[in-house]
Structure formats: structure tokens, C-alpha cells
């Protein structure tokens, strides 16, 4: 469970993540504690964007690349050892998050401003966003564009099949921030799934 309250010495970052190559843009704005690592940021990005975490991911921070244990290529660093307080060099800084090395969903993450924790506030929390996350495995930005064209045209020969593949319906403008924050509020429970990763920080330092 996410703990309400504040703790001395903690800074909160406001960040905006935008899915690149998709128009109109799919984006989210969220707040996260500087004590979180890139490994935790990965889970936050999966939730706020709406991905299902089926695929390999990596972070690009300046000239350095970070990945998850067991999925790191030569020269990459462990994302679980990289706190935001160390890798975020200042407000306005950008980093990149690549999800699914096949479809290559590239996200730009901009750290917009910092602030002290607000008493009684839950972190991490999504505070704004627009549009639905593309379906998994739809073929990247180009495939997603084709997908939208097909489901938007009942006369297209692929229309029914594509719609069925997507679960029967898909609204590209849909975004439910309450649902996102409900999942974020339970992120602490995911600790049970992450015990074997040997995270280099105490469980009580992940979320506020």
C-alpha cells in the first residue's frame, strides 16, 4: 500500500512522458519521489501509459543505457541501482524509455519541476494525460496508424477481424486517470513479485 504523508529529505519530481511517433500525441504527467529507481520508474511508466509489460525495455539517459537484470546487453547498467536523485541532473532534463524492441515504442520523459512532498498526498500519482495507449503488438507507430485507419472504416475488409483482435472495441481518445491511480496505489503490493531482483534499497523507500 502507498503511504500517505511526507518524509524529510525527499523531493518529488513532476514528469511528463510522451509516446513518440504517434499523432495526436499520447502522453501522461505524473509525480514520483526522487528515491525511486529507474526500475521502479519502469513499473510506473507501464501503469500510467497502459502497457502490459510483456516485452523487454531499456532506458537511455545521456550516453548511458540501463536495463533490467537478466535483460542487459554489454555495457548496460542495472536500472535497479539507479535512483532518480542521481540520474536526474536538473529540471528540464530528458531521458528516453524504449519498450518492446520489436515494435520499438519510444517514450520521451521530461522532468519538469521539483517540489517537497505534500502532506497526505499519495506518490506516485498521475495528474494528467491524454488518449489511449496503443494495443500491444500492433506493429509500432506505423502499425498503430494502420490499425486506427482500419477500425475507423467499417468498409475496410480487415475491419471486423482487426476489431475482434482488439477485444471488440477501441477508443483512441479514452483515458481513465482514476483507473490508473487505483493501480498505482497498489504498486507496493507488487513488491512480492520483485523480491528476487535484490533491489538495493529498503522497501519503505520506494513510495511515499
Image (spheres, rainbow, N blue to C red):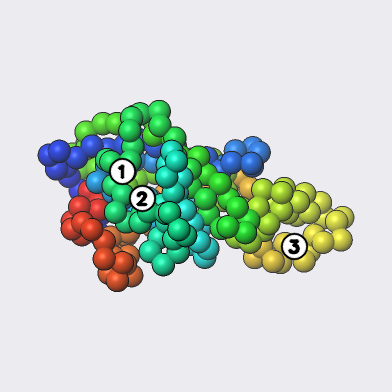
Q: Which of marks 1 and 2 is nearer the N terminus?
A: 2
**Are the two marked residues, 1 and 2, in contact with CB atoms closer than 8 angstroms?**
yes
The crowd level at tag 3 (other Cα within 10 Å; few <14, some 14-19, many 20+) is some
3D distance between C-alphas at marks 1 and 2: 7 Å
Mark carried by residue 84: 1
Q: Nearer the viewer, residue 32 or 101?
A: 101
In x, y percent, where is residue 126? Answer: 39, 44
Q: Seen from this angle, which residue lies furthest front? A: 74
Mark carried by residue 38: 2
3D distance between C-alphas at marks 1 and 3: 40 Å
In the displayed structure image, the side of residue 51 where residue 113 appears, left or right: left
In x, y percent, where is residue 62? Answer: 43, 38
**Are the two marked residues, 3 and 2, in contact with CB atoms closer than 8 angstroms?**
no
Report the number of numbered marks: 3
Q: Nearer the viewer, residue 48 or 60?
A: 60
Mark carried by residue 162: 3
Task: Give the answer, above or below, for where 14 lies relative to 193.
Answer: above
> For the point 50% across and 61% down, which residue is it?
56
Mark carried by residue 131: none
Q: Which of 39 and 131 is in front in this view?
A: 39
Amino acid at each position: 500500500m502507498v503511504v500517505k504523508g511526507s518524509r524529510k529529505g525527499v523531493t518529488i519530481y513532476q514528469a511528463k512522458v510522451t509516446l513518440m511517433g504517434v499523432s495526436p500525441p499520447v502522453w501522461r504527467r505524473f509525480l514520483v519521489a526522487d528515491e525511486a529507481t529507474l526500475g521502479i520508474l519502469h513499473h510506473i511508466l507501464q501503469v500510467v501509459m497502459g502497457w502490459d509489460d510483456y516485452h523487454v525495455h531499456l532506458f537511455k539517459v545521456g550516453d548511458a543505457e540501463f536495463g533490467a537484470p537478466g535483460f542487459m546487453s554489454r555495457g548496460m547498467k542495472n536500472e535497479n541501482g539507479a535512483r532518480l536523485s542521481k540520474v536526474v541532473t536538473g529540471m528540464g532534463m530528458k531521458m528516453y524509455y524504449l519498450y518492446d524492441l520489436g515494435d520499438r515504442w519510444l517514450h520521451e520523459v521530461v522532468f519538469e519541476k521539483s517540489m517537497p512532498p505534500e502532506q497526505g498526498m499519495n506518490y506516485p500519482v498521475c495528474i494528467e494525460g491524454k488518449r489511449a495507449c496503443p494495443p500491444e503488438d500492433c506493429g509500432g507507430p506505423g502499425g498503430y496508424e494502420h490499425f486506427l485507419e482500419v477500425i475507423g472504416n467499417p468498409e475496410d475488409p480487415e475491419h471486423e477481424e482487426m476489431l475482434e483482435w482488439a477485444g471488440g472495441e477501441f477508443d483512441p481518445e479514452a483515458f481513465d486517470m482514476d483507473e490508473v491511480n487505483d493501480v498505482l496505489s497498489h504498486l507496493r503490493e507488487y513488491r512480492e513479485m520483485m523480491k528476487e531482483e535484490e533491489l538495493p534499497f529498503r522497501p519503505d523507500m520506494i513510495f511515499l
